[in-house]
Amino acid sequence: MPLRVLVALVALTATACEHPLEVPRDPGVVYLAALGEVPAAELHRAARALEQASHRVVLTLAPIALPTPTADGRADAGALLDLLLRHAPDDTFRIAGVTAAPLRATEHDSVIGYARRGERALLYSTAALPGYSTEAARRRTVRRIVAHEMGHTFGSGHCRASCVMRDTMNPNAIELMPDQPCRLHRHESDIGLAHGIDHPDFLADVAAERTRLGQWDRAIDAWRRALAGRPRDARMLTSLGVALMANGELTAAKEAFDDASRAAPEAPQPYYARAVLYAAGDRPERAEPFLEAAVERDGDPLRAHRAAGILYQDVLDDSKHALHHFEAHVRKGGRDREVITRLTFLLSPTTLVFTDPETIVARWQPGRGLLIASLGPSH
């Protein structure tokens, strides 16, 4: 039975810090939206903080209805970010949401604010904020939260220095947070702020968002616009090919992967992508040489053998080659839990039972390589 492939790509973009600061030709707009019922005064505070953090015009959108909360009554912060991105107008530089609902995230049962690194959406909740004796104190807190979450959108992580990017789960600790970022995180923010919405790095971030959301046509358009400024960027070419493959445009996907390999012959990503293209399509016999070529080029042998083993097992139904790569992963010191589980199954098939996969998710994740996972039979 033919396999149906769904491909999601995250953060396959060139590092913005490699490029000099530029004056944005089109700076874009920062949009603000209430998620559910939010007092006008709260939106006014948020708008002022966003203007200060972004140096952009801030426009307020119509309120957006909150989705059904989780079982504990909290709103899913990740789902709200996706909701904001789906409402983002084409000229969005950043889109921010404010809600009175308490938030939770995958990593934490309770969060005050939330943003994904390298994406355009950020949000915060007023539910856990302490009471304030003055309006100035409340504005200062909102300003720090907005600066912190916007820093994440520029790619910054948490910081241990005296920095607005310090991690805090305690609302009262926000009062101890500095107003300004450290030198490193200021540099990252300065680069992000210098990028207009027509900059290749910005467009690549937009394309990665849309790919993750499954908006294939819009992702393809964004990747192509990014490539207009960087026609030989192998990572962007590979990402374009992945989006084309997910959209069923297989010939165009192959051409993009070929262009990526010509631009960077030693890069493993185009070879992984070609292996997935053939493995999950109608030419599985052509996947093996590309997969092995990808493993040879990958600078991280642990992730390379992990990815190869999963592809052989889940898609190519080749237990012999899967076993070889899982064992290589372990021999080289890898202890990935999924690899150990799969290796145990291959060595003793009666121990575990896997369903026949018909839907495959392939994702390139920095630091781990191509991740391939079965979603089980498609329906």
Image (cartoon, rainbow, N blue to C red):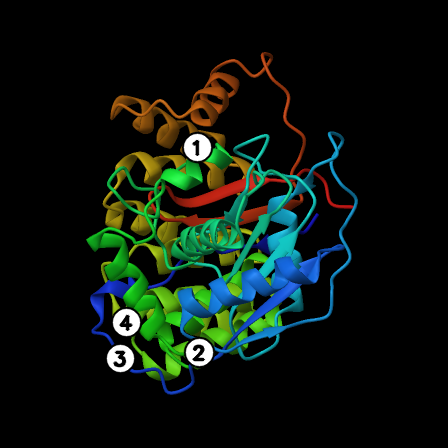
| Residue 370's disc number | none
Observer-nearest residue: 202 or 159?
Answer: 159
SS of the residue under disc 3:
loop
Reading the image, the residue beneath label 4 is: 262
In the image, what residue occupies the spot 27% across and 54% down? Answer: 185
Q: Give the Cα distance between marks 2 and 4.
A: 28 Å
x%, y% of residue 292? 33, 46
Q: Do the residues labelled 2 and 4 touch (CB within 8 Å)?
A: no
Q: Specify whether residue 140 is in view.
A: yes
Mark 4 or 1, which is nearer the eye?
A: 4
Q: Give the Cα distance between marks 3 and 2.
A: 12 Å
Residue 356, image quadrant: top right
At label 4, the amino acid type is Arg
Q: Earlier in the sequence, mark 2 or mark 4?
A: 2
Observer-nearest residue: 19 or 29?
Answer: 29
Q: Give the Cα distance between marks 4 and 3.
A: 29 Å
Observer-nearest residue: 293 or 143?
Answer: 143
As drawn, 244 above or below 353: below
Q: Give the Cα distance between marks 4 and 1.
A: 29 Å
Reading the image, the residue beneath label 3 is: 22
Q: Which of marks 4 and 3 is nearer the N terminus?
A: 3
x%, y% of residue 162? 25, 42
Q: Are marks 4 and 3 in contact (CB under 8 Å)?
A: no
Q: Give the Cα distance between marks 3 and 1.
A: 47 Å
Estimate how packed mark 4 is, as few (under 14), some (14 to 19) or many (20 or more) residues with alpha carbons within 10 Å. Answer: some
At label 3, the amino acid type is Glu
Reading the image, the residue beneath label 2 is: 197
Q: Do the residues labelled 3 and 1 touch (CB within 8 Å)?
A: no
